[in-house]
Image: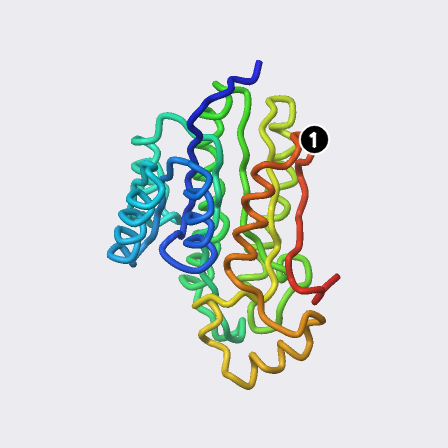
Amino acid sequence: MVIEKEQKSALITGASRGIGKAAAELFAEHGYDLTLTCHRSMESLESLAARLQAVYGIRCRPVQADMGREEDVERLFSHIRDLDVLVNNAGMAYFGLLSHMTADQWHRILAVNLDSCFYTCRAAVPLMLKNHSGRILNISSVWGTQGASMEVAYSASKGGMNAFTKALAKELAPSNIQVNAIACGVIDTTMNDCLSPEDLETLREEIPAGRIGHPREAAELIFRMAQAPPYMTGQIITIDGGWYT
């Protein structure tokens, strides 16, 4: 039996900027109580949380956590008693030749982008099982299916996230918990700061929509997927302006 609740809650990781921040704003607009995380930008996250509470009258708890560390995620969930939506948005990129990459850099990318999904989902699923409902949304990338030169580790981590999503969706479908992923194309976030103006212009020319996506657009898709029919699970939905359609 699905337990209906008046007040819903969401955990959004990597919420101090970019897509995570835009998603936090949108969930707050719709009355969700929030737990938001970041690794380093705690001042920005605390400011965001205070503003969302003041404007929308929700509860919003900012937490500093390295989502690639098991102990940090366990500490985070020690304060979460109920959860309707989990948005795994925390992530990092590495741009460079694979032959120049150290083992520590490789493991760090895999930890933040993929291990974090394991840690959060393992902790969130029991909370969702008690209500026989829940939504898990993993923020992936078009590079998870296409692969990107000079971004082998990032591509591998997002490809792993996609497989993780499909497998966990099958595991949790009997429990009415939906697991989906959003594969983002080029979105205007600080993750793209490594790209030169010339690189960005080349990308714009390649994208049929003729522009780079806005974080709010990605956030709107995240929220809509959190409200999607329960029969929708195990899907990797792309938002890329027609780039890899």
- Residue name at image x 41 percent, y 39 percent: 11
Q: Position of residue 209 (x, y in %)?
A: 68, 70
Dot 1: what SS? Answer: loop
Q: Image quadrant for the N terminus?
A: top right
Above or below, comparing residue 162 to residue 169 in the picture? below
Quarter assignment of residue 22: bottom left
Amino acid carrying mark 1 in the image: Tyr
Quarter assignment of residue 164: top right
Q: Is residue 235 left or right of residue 152?
A: right
Q: Nearer the viewer, residue 180 or 44?
A: 44
Q: Position of residue 43 (x, y in %)?
A: 24, 57
Q: Nearer the viewer, residue 8 or 163?
A: 8
Where is mark 1, residue-wise? 231
Above or below, comparing residue 169 to residue 66 in the picture? above
The crowding category of the residue bearing disc 1, from other C-alpha atoms within 10 Å (few below 14, some 14 to 19, many at least 20), is few
Residue farthest along the top direction in this orientation:
1
Q: Position of residue 203 (x, y in %)?
A: 62, 77
Q: Nearer the viewer, residue 19 or 53?
A: 53
- Residue name at image x 40 percent, y 62 percent: 104
Q: Is residue 143 left or right of residue 111?
A: right
